[in-house]
Amino acid sequence: MSSKLDPHKAKNLIPPDYWLLILSSFILFLMFGLNLFFSENPRSNEVSSLVKVHENSTFKNLADNLEKKKIISRKNAFLFCGFVLGVEKKIKAGSYNVPYGLSNYALLKMFYEGSGKSTVKITFPEGIPLKQIAKLSSDSLNFSQTEFLRIASSKEAMAKYNRQISSLEGYLMPDTYEFFTDSKPEEIIEKMQFQFNKFYDDRIKPYELKLKMNKHEIVTLASIIEAETNVDTERATISGVYHNRLKKKMRLEADPTVAYTLPWPPRRLLYKDLKIKSPYNTYLNLGLPPGPINSPGRASLLAAVNPEIHNYLYFVSTGRNDGHKFSRTYSEHQRAVREYRRTQR
């Protein structure tokens, strides 16, 4: 008698109903898994909620927070999905603007990629000093003005960006930027410095040899031009005045350099202010001040290296918000000053 089973009979050892049960169980398990991963979590009357993930937060901390804010309905399901996908130890710290109604998979993808981190836009106007950049940044982000200024004047920052300067005054490009709400001062500085260097290297650096001026001198002059006027059409004219005075070894006598020595916010200068003993006071010292007095914009940087060719040596405000009156001689300038004073009565 043979011990081998008949192959035709072996096929009948597992009943068809059993295969159907296995297939049904697999389908149910698949549907359950898909439901865990892809079904929407509860919606809310609110569109989204702010969720902060700290550097030392655990995945369970995140799940607890999401459950507390009612972003997820089943914490254990969220934890299970994170474990299966292997992202429970790979979530990125930050402040997230999390919409309600997302699936567990969408939430996990957001925290894994850092794609839902909330952002804020900050506008830094042309001509503001470093202290104001620090204030505008700290008003919108989670650090202090003091911390920003400390980092912007640190030895590390100087070594990274320019070993020849003592602070980043003038070297952060004014513009509107978008930052993550958990950004640190280093990230703000990095972004603004990148934009400054890109513009300077592309548009300004080629003029250094022709003008026999270095980067620091150009940026310093641009900052004075920036502070003198907001009328684009006269930036090059004012630049020409200062280039003429520098060539003639005349003191620049630029009011904004004196204002820079005074507390913020700026006020109207008094005659006694012109006698303040400071290396920045160009009424007392020849040449450019030690460094920039604000953050010049692109137009003023371009004006600094493209001065208008003329014989003007003086200028004073017209008093009518339409710019300045330019003069070739001191006597012409005095007449323009008297005219200005009449407009102020």
Image: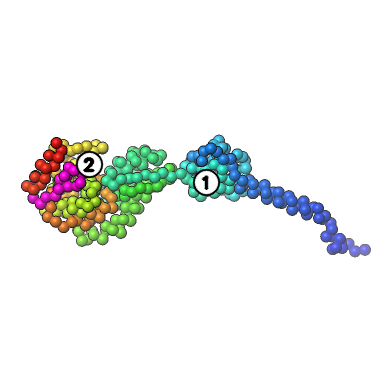
153 left or right of 246? right
Q: What residue is rendered at 53% in x and 37% in y?
A: 45
* Disc 1 to disc 2, C-alpha distance: 45 Å
The residue type indicated by label 2 comes to Tyr
Where does residue 73 sit, x and y in percent of width and height? 60, 39
Where does residue 265 sit, x and y in percent of width and height? 26, 37
Q: To which quarter of the image does residue 302 belong? A: bottom left
Tell me the residue that label 1 is attached to: 111
Q: What residue is rendered at 31% in x and 48% in y?
A: 174
Whether residue 318 appears in magenta in the rendering, the answer is: yes
- Write the start and end of the magenta stretch as one range: 315-330
Tell me the residue that label 2 is attached to: 260
Sequence-first tag of 1 and 2: 1
Q: What residue is rendered at 77% in x and 53% in y?
A: 20
The residue type indicated by label 1 comes to Phe
Q: How is the image coloured?
A: rainbow
Q: Are marks 1 and 2 in contact (CB under 8 Å)?
A: no
Where does residue 318 sit, x and y in percent of width and height? 16, 44
